[in-house]
Amino acid sequence: MTLETHIKESIFENGPMTIADYMVLALTQPEYGYYMRKDPFGVQGDFTTAPEISQIFGELVGAWLVTQWVMMGKPNAALAEIGPGRGTLMADILRATSKVKGFHDAITVHLMELSPTLRQKQWTTLAGKHPDITWHMGFAEIPSKPLLLVANEFFDALPIRQYLHEADGWKERKIGLDKHGKLEFVLEAANPPRQLEEEPVSENIYEYCDAATQMGFVIANRIATHGGSALIIDYGYEHGNGDTLQAVRHHRHHEVLEEPGTADLTAHVDFGNLTHAAAIGGCTVYGPVGQGFFLNRLGALERTAALCEKATEKQKEALTSGITRLTSAEQMGTLFKALCIIAPALPKPEGF
Ligand code: SAH
């Protein structure tokens, strides 16, 4: 049975499905979920992420984490990544920090990953990079101690629900079956989450990601209790942005309802909501700032220039075009944003 058949059966039996349930099945259903069976990254795959574009991304993030660790008083800490993909970012972080006195000894490394295929890939990428690396299914498994956490393009994979307000009240946009048995979007009367109830603009689509709210809260709560810093980078907005649900396959737009499980499915991250959740969790939040602003503040240009000194012409070109892609406003510099969640006692972090 394909995932599509499974979804159709479920709708046939139980009625329209929320977009969140559809996303969870399409992305992480153990047998057919998009992330569970394949490595979707890179030119050969479906999409390319910042650490896959340039090693400088992970090096700057590594330097940022060390700065935070020093600010925190160099504690024994959990260095954690949630949604680590191929493990490239963590590999670059570990390589860039390997010469920092005491850092590798002070940390244990934790990767939160559901996909067995990607866990395997991460294991290979990270072999020999640190003696103490553990994989986890959920955040609660990461040991309770000072936390240094990174998440790049993780939150956009979390399931959202969509609501809109019509003359006769709130509706939820769900997935049903048309009369030919094809998947289609439908509207059902609904009670929206509390967060959306204020003065809706008619016919606007409002998205809400409960999983992101919860994740933002538990990360902040851990940091408020045990100390730490979290860096979240993703594409998204600060205030409502309409319908941002999208599917991508082979670097191209794909219909959201076609062949679920074969394309990446994401929604823009609501940084306003994440900020709110982290504040309720007891932390101070900085940003979001544009990824370009953040990386430039951390010395992206200087790092590029230093690497170019020892590089061949071809490598120079790759280094320069990579960093341009990550920082320029026309490419990933503005749409992608960085947010920092830190313990209230810490000073303003670098890059914000
Ligand atoms: N950070 C990586 C990969 C981003 S893709 C990079 O920048 O290249 C999203 C990652 O999150 C994948 O590794 C995917 O398997 C993982 N993932 C998605 N949903 C998850 C969940 N609910 N729990 C844990 N990992 C999840």
Image (tube, grey):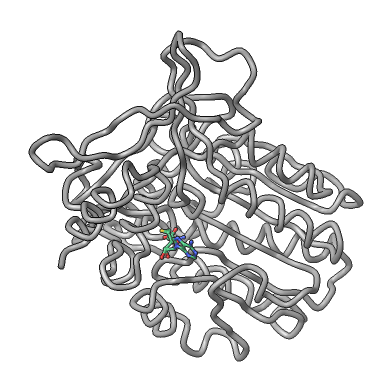
Kindly identify the residue that appears in the image at 39 percent across and 84 percent down: 124
Report which quarter residue 245 is drawn in. top left
The foreground one among 282 and 69 is 282
Say left or right for 202 vs 68: left
Q: Position of residue 148 (x, y in %)?
A: 70, 65
Q: Position of residue 277 (x, y in %)?
A: 71, 43
Residue at the extreme right: 345
Kindly identify the residue that appears in the image at 27 percent across and 58 percent down: 314
Asked if 58 appears above or below 283 in the picture, the reply is below
Quadrant in which the N terminus appears: bottom left
Q: Position of residue 247 (x, y in %)?
A: 27, 44
Kindly identify the residue that appears in the image at 33 percent across and 77 percent down: 117
Say left or right for 260 vs 65: left
Quadrant in which the C terminus appears: top right
Image mark count = 0
Residue at the extreme front: 13
Report which quarter residue 132 is drawn in. bottom right
Kindly identify the residue that appears in the image at 37 percent across and 55 percent down: 53
Q: Position of residue 296 (x, y in %)?
A: 58, 42
Asked if 43 appears above or below 276 in the picture, the reply is below
Q: Quadrant of ligand 1?
A: bottom left
Say left or right for 266 vs 299: left
Asked if 295 appears above or below 42 in the picture, the reply is above
